[in-house]
Image: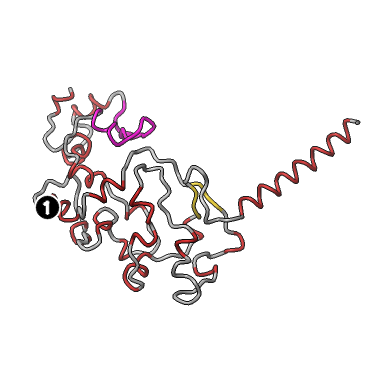
Amino acid sequence: MTLGSDSWIWRIFFSLSTILLSILARSSPHESSPAGRVSQLPESLIFSHRLHLTKAQASCQDCHATAWGSTSATDNKLPSEKDCLKCHDGQQARRECTVCHKHPESAVRSRLPARDFRFNHQLHLELGNLAPVIAAAIDSGNYLSPPQNIRAQLNREIPCLACHRGLDETDLAGKANLPQMADCLVCHAEIDPPFSCEFCHTKEAKIKPSSHTADYLDLHNSGKVKLEKQSCQICHGAHFRCMGCH
């Protein structure tokens, strides 16, 4: 076989491989990979938590049933196509692809970002509704971040909304609907960095503020860096003393 014909065969093989990978990427967009971290791109989806929670009266467990048995932050807790078709069967609710996908003909799977923290949904759900606990921390001034509108969003009827606040007022969920560190510290109140950090954050997590450079100690002692203690207490606790670290 000549070099020219050999090169021609490899070009055909490469082209066929590219086509096959493209087909696999487009097939079964609802199904997850073995790692369980694959989902649709948010900008390609049409979904309303507000509509499902208020008008359709769906429960969180109807769509996120796997959360009740999830013990790892890396578990896939997103609904599958099977979950959607429980209601979207053409009778209770429409079944057309365009109900959920803006461009169903070009729907592809997208890998969700890796988790650099640990969390056990099963354990926390067994604790019951934590909304009253978070509300008490805000009311007593022990909440370690500015509460803003959090207090008004605490839903005492749906346990999930204690941490995933505002879902009944929004469509596609985003970072604003995820719990913040101050929520965790209501119960996990023993703060002793870096040891307490390692309880929830993995070694890959980058939690050290960008401001903490090599000369940070000299800078903030000189007064050039204007800091409020409240901005430090989310990592160092409410009763820390500067001399405790330095």
Q: Between residues 223 and 213, which one lies in front from this camera angle? A: 213
Secondary structure that dominates the magenta span? loop
Tell me where residue 21 appears, x and y as whole percent. 66, 47
Please report the bounds of the magenta region as a residue range.
195-213
In the rendered image of this protein, does residue 246 appear above or below residue 229? above
Query: What residue is drawn where x is 29% and y is 31%?
Result: 198
Q: Nearer the viewer, residue 8 or 75?
A: 75
Query: Residue 51: horizontal and vertical position, in percent?
Result: 36, 70
- Give residue 192's quadrant in the image: top left
139 and 188: which is toward the camera: 188
Name the quarter where the C terminus is drawn.
top left
Tell me if 27 is positioned left or right of 59 in this view.
Answer: right
Front-lying residue, 81 or 150: 81
Q: Going by the picture, which residue comes out furthest to the right?
A: 2
Which color scheme does this rendered protein use? secondary structure
Judged from this view, the residue extending furthest toward the left is 140
Q: What is the count of numbered marks?
A: 1
Q: Residue furthest bottom?
A: 91
| 43 relative to 197, above or below | below
Left or right, 153 with reference to 64: left
Q: Quadrant of the N terminus?
A: top right
Q: Is residue 165 magenta?
A: no
For the residue labelled by badge 1, is the local secondary structure a helix, a strand or a loop? helix
Q: Residue visible at 49% across and 52% down? A: 39
According to the picture, the residue beneath numbered tag 1 turns out to be 136
Q: The disc labelled 1 sits on which kind of residue?
A: Ala
Q: Local crowd at mark 1 within 10 Å, few (<14), some, or many (≥20)? A: some
